[in-house]
Amino acid sequence: MTERPLDTDIPSPARIYDLWLGGKDNYEIDRVVSEQILAAVPELPVLARTNREFLGRAVRYMAGEAGIRQFLDIGTGIPTANNTHQVAQSVAPDSHVVYVDNDPMVLAHARALLRSAPDGTTAFIDADLREPDKILAAVRDLLDFDRPIGLTLLGVVDFLPDTAEAASIIRTLLAPMAPGSHLAISHGLVGTQLDEGVRHWNESGGSPMTLRTLEEVTGFFDGLDLLEPGVVALPRWRPVPETLYADREAVYYAGVGRKA
């Protein structure tokens, strides 16, 4: 895996997300853009934490009740607490996890994502969600497509501007996966206070984001069995007693679907 040079003049969604989670892997441009966004949407650090909590609940469900032992996490982000492999392997130590990201800062931290439980495995691929065939080719030797896979796309489909193309990419990724595979998506909704924050982000020079309607986000699960409670505000997807902010409305929604 070759590490590309970091571009400190362009804001990175992974670094800003890490900043909101309390991380230190960011640059001046990230802090400036973050301040502009938070001036419009001050609760975004809450969103970052609720998105991380959703990841934990969704992966625990997949590794536990659904019995999945393989995970493909695309748009991984900078390692923090409760990464996918840590959650999955805490439930099923023999879980295999493949991470995919193309952010140089994430690549620089990839070794932290490769620390697996003794009975499981982790791997990292440098690739872009917009190249699903490349991703599938790279993971063929790492995951068994004859057994169910848990595919997570959290906060990353927002960076695909064309909804039809985004849906096609998701279908391409799911097509070779075995019945019983699961898809987890989290995505920002248009027509919320997030609109102004995304406007600031898109003016910053970073990779542009696209917000979508609830109907459009739900459409990404077409052809799958959408699990209860459907596509809902992040904290309302199967909350547990320790779930933060379960009583709040949210600008980010999430759901999990099963391939029949």
Image (cartoon, rainbow, N blue to C red):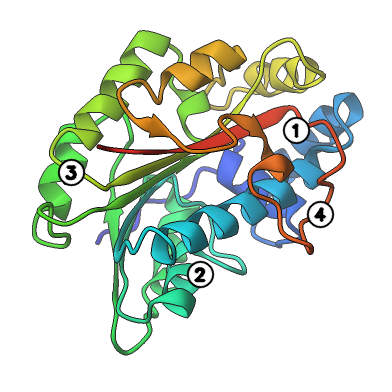
188 w.r.t. 20: above or below: above
Q: Nearer the viewer, residue 124 or 176?
A: 176
**Mark 3 is on which residue type?**
Met
Residue bearing the label numbered 3: 177
Q: Are marks 3 and 4 in contact (CB under 8 Å)?
A: no
- Tell me the crowding category of disc 1: few under 14, some 14 to 19, or many 20 or more residues within 10 angstroms, Cα based: many
Residue found at x 74% / y 27% = 251
Q: Earlier in the sequence, mark 4 or mark 1?
A: 1
The disc labelled 1 sits on which kind of residue? Answer: Val
Mark 4 closeness class: few <14, some 14–19, many ≥20 residues within 10 Å: some
Q: Residue at x 67, y 13 (%)?
A: 190
Label 2 amino acid? Val
Which label is found at residue 59? none
Pointers 2 and 4 in contact (C-beta within 8 Å): no
The alpha-carbon separation of the residues under discs 2 and 3 comes to 22 Å
First of labels 2, 4 by sequence position: 2
Q: Residue at x 46, y 28 (%)?
A: 157
Residue 204's x, y, as percent?
67, 23
Tell me the residue that label 4 is attached to. 244
**Residue 159 in picture, x, y percent from top left:** 49, 25
Q: Can I make out residue 155 in this image? A: no
Discs 4/1, front: 4
**If you read the primary sequence from the N terminus, does the residue marked by circle 2 or circle 3 appear first?**
2
Q: On the picture, is 144 further left or further right than 219? A: left
* Residue carrying label 1: 33
How far separated are the C-alphas under marks 4 and 1? 26 Å
For numbered disc 1, what is the local secondary structure? helix
* Residue linked to disc 2: 87
* Separation of marks 3 and 1 at Cα, in angstroms: 38 Å
Find the residue positioned furthest to the bottom: 118
